[in-house]
Image (tube, grey):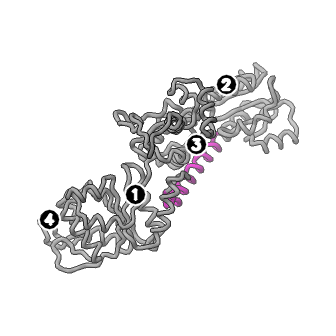
Amino acid sequence: MTQNILVIEDDDIINLLIVKYLKDMGHNAVGVSSLAEANAYCEEHEPHLIITDVRLPDGDCLRQLPKLTENQPVIILTAYGSVKESVEAMKAGAFDYLVKPISPDELILVVKRALDSAALYSDHQFCKRRLQARENATSFMIGQSEALQEVKQLIDAVAPSAMTVLILGESGSGKELVARAIHARSTRAERNFVAVDCCTLQDNLFESELFGHERGAFTGAEKLKKGLIEGAEGGTLFLDEIGELDSTIQAKLLRVLETGQFRRVGGTRDLSANVRIVAATNRNLKEMSEQGSFRPDLYYRLEGFTITTPPLRARRDDIRDLVDHFIRNHDFSRRINKNITNKAMRKLLAYNWPGNVRELKNVVERAIILSRDKKAIRTEHLAFSLGQSSPEASLTFSFNHDPTLSELEQIYLEMMLEKHAGHRASVAKTLGISERNVYRLIQKYGLAREKV
C-alpha cells in the first residue's frame, strides 16, 4: 500500500538517497531540510511516517518529537548517536533510532515495521472504540448543557417508577434516546425494549403487529402470532409518533393503559400486558385532542408525566461533545483518527440545525467520508441540508413591559453571539460594526465568554 512519507534531513545527498529508496519501495516520499519546511508541509498534508535528522538548521528535532508523534510514527536518524540521546528519543515517542550511515536494507526493514505497527495500532484503536461504543450503548445523553441536565433529572426521577411517559420534541431531537435511557435506568432494564414506529405500518396491519393475531383471524393468518406487546413482556414498549395512530387503535391502546389487558386480533381471551408504555410525538397532542383527531381520554392517560426534548439550537453547548462522539463512534470502517478544525467547528456551532441531532450526525458522518484519508475535517467537508427554513429567518423578542433601546440592543447581541458561537468577527460582520465595537458592547452588557 502506497504511503506518504516525509523526510527531514539537511544533508542534500542523504535526503535525496532516502527519498529515492522510499520511492523504490512504492511510497510517496517528500524531502525537506528544516523544521519550518516540515511544519509547512504538515499544514497541508498528513504523512503516514516521518523520518528525521536530530540536529537541523533551525532546531533540535527531539524537542519537536511530542508534537510530531501525535499523528504518525517518527524514525530518528543521526550521525552523533549516544545511549542517552537514544533513550531520550524513545521516551519522547520515537518509533526507532538509527545511526548514520544506514544501509538501504536496514532502512527498508525499519520503515516497513513502522508502517505495519502504525496500521496495527490503528486497527486496534478502531476495534477498541467499537467495543466501547457497544458497551456504552446506554450512555445516550451526550453533553452537559443546562437544557440536557434538566432532561436527565426528569429521566432519573421517573425511570424507577412504572409510570407511563410521554416524550415531546421536534423530529431528530432524540426522543427515542430518552425512551431508551428511561428503560435502561428502570427495574425493567434486563428485559426487552421494543420500539414501534407508528408511521410505518398501515392501519390494517398495525393492530396485528401490536396485539398479535389468532390462527384464522383473517385471510393469510395460518398460525398464531404474538404481537409486540407480548414481545416486550416485562420490559418497555416504545410507541414513536403516537399522534399518527387512528381512532380504533387509540381506543384499544387506552384499554391496555387502563386495565393492563388486551386481546389478539380474532381472539376472545383477555391477555395481560406486563409492559411499561413510553410514547413520543412531534405533534401537539393537546391541540389534536381539542380538535377531535386524538382521543382526549388517551391524551390525559399519556401526559401524566411529560418530558420535552430540547432542540439542538437550545443546547449549542453540547455540539462539541456530540461531534466528538460521532467521530469516535461512527459505524463504518474508515480507520483514521479524525479531528475537526476550529473553523469547521464554528460553522457547526453557528448553524441552526432544523433537523436537530439527527441532522448533526448525518453532517458529521458525511464529512468523515468526504475527508477520505485526511485526519482533519475542514469547512469544505461540511454539507448542510438545502431548502430548509431556519428559525433564524425571523426574530422574536418577548418582554412583559415596553423595552428600552438598550434592552433590545442587549437581547439582539446575545442572540447573535449565540448564533455565531461567540465569534466576535462574525458578529461584527452581521451587525455592520467593528469587532472592537462588538467587544465594547460585550463588556457593557457583561456578556463576556470564551472566544471560540
> Which corner quadrant of the image does residue 425 belong to?
top right
Residue wearing tag 2:
40
Q: Which mark is residue 220?
A: 4
Judge whether residue 347 can be spotted in this image: no
User: Mark 1 touching mark 3, by CB under 8 A?
Assistant: no
The span shown in magenta is 115-140
Crowdedness near tag 2: few (<14), some (14–19) or many (≥20) residues, C-alpha within 10 Å: few
Q: Amino acid at mark 3?
A: Asn
Q: Which label's residue is closer to the chain start, 2 or 3?
A: 2
Q: Is residue 380 magenta?
A: no
Residue at numbered disc 3: 337
Residue 171 x/y as whole percent: 36, 49
Tag on residue 176? 1
Q: Residue furthest front?
A: 402
The answer to whether residue 134 is magenta is: yes
How busy is the neighbourhood of tag 3: few (under 14 within 10 Å), some, or many (20 plus)?
some
* Left or right of residue 354: residue 426: right
Image quarter where the C terminus lies is top right
